[in-house]
Amino acid sequence: NHAKRSGDRTRFFSPSMADELYQREVLQVRFIDALARNGLSLHFQPQFCLVSGKLIGAEALCRWQDDTLGWVSPGDFIPLAEEQGLIGRLGDWVLDAACRQLERWEAQGKAFPGRLCVNVSAQQMDDPQLAEHVQRLTARVAPGRIGLELTESGLMRNPDQTVSITRALRAAGFGMAIDDFGTGYSSLTYLKRFAADTLKIDMSFVQDMLESSHDRAIVATIIAMAQTLGMRTVAEGVETHDQAEALKALGCSGVQGFYFGRPVDADSFAAHWL
Ligand code: C2E
Ligand code: MG
Ligand code: MG
Ligand code: MG
């Protein structure tokens, strides 16, 4: 009675399926609780200029440590938040927390250079007022200190509305990056219209570029295209010195990855990088 027969009208739940459902339920309830009780935190990963070696900013990455479940990966709770219609609340919390952190570092005499980048989910783009909303939430800091990252696949969910939102945000002074670039299907026409100033090269290409001439060619093409369009490139997931050297030789502007620094909490970030 534990069989899961496809094509059969009667489907039995196997113990593992029941387990999985139960786990999801638990995860969901606990996530809602974390969101309501300020149980989330941000970690920060440095980004560097490949030419000068200087810190150019950081990416803020959401973290959730549950009392009983331990650390839950954003790869698990971000999709959950999206399914539950909670990503707007999470996105608001992240933006506010990022701005407060910029203020806190400043108050500590730790000047943060460049941009603090925050991930924006595709679903947040469903709100036609998102640009105004982001401006209200980040009013405590200058817009030029905040970068917004949107995944390439996310941009194409509702491309016309996304074009107008990204243009409004750029006009207001925010930085705008296309995340995981190379894995989505954005057309070149839209790429120009999105008004981004940075392409983040997806780590899958970066990590294989020394072994695969195919991936190296993709990285080279993305960098060349960005230069033509007047955009910066930031390579994600740089784990070795050789990858960094290869990216530099290809003219990549910025890097982020474990080789340069892992995501860490605000105090560690300040101690290491500010
Ligand atoms: P992402 O925006 O592409 O962020 C980069 C991810 O790559 C992060 O994973 C980071 O820890 C990881 N990473 C950085 N350098 C390296 C490296 O050298 N090697 C490897 N293997 N990984 C590296 P993380 O923190 O687990 O986040 C995963 C994804 O979850 C993010 O991908 C982003 O899409 C999403 N996410 C995280 N925080 C937020 C958030 O606040 N809001 C939204 N909407 N999404 C978020
Ligand atoms: Mg990102
Ligand atoms: Mg990425
Ligand atoms: Mg990613």
Image (cartoon, rainbow, N blue to C red):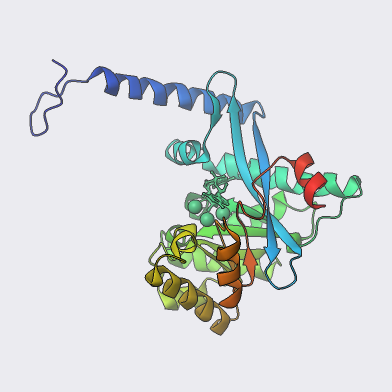
Does residue 21 appear left or right of residue 100 in this picture? left
Q: Position of residue 12 (x, y in %)?
A: 17, 20
Q: Of residues 38 and 237, which is closer to you in this image?
A: 237
Instruction: Residue lying at the far top in this picture: please name it.
Output: 1
Q: Residue at x 67, y 69 (%)?
A: 50
Question: Where ligand 2 lies, by image quadrant?
Answer: bottom right
Above/below status of 38 relative to 151? above
Q: Residue at x 67, y 71 (%)?
A: 171
Q: Of residues 39 and 248, which is closer to you in this image?
A: 248
Q: Position of residue 262 (x, y in %)?
A: 64, 47
Q: Position of residue 23 (x, y in %)?
A: 40, 22
Instruction: Residue lying at the far bottom in this picture: please name it.
Output: 228
Could you tell me which quadrant the N terminus lies in? top left
Instruction: Residue lying at the far left in this picture: please name it.
Output: 8
Q: Residue at x 47, y 27 (%)?
A: 28
Above/below status of 131 relative to 198? above
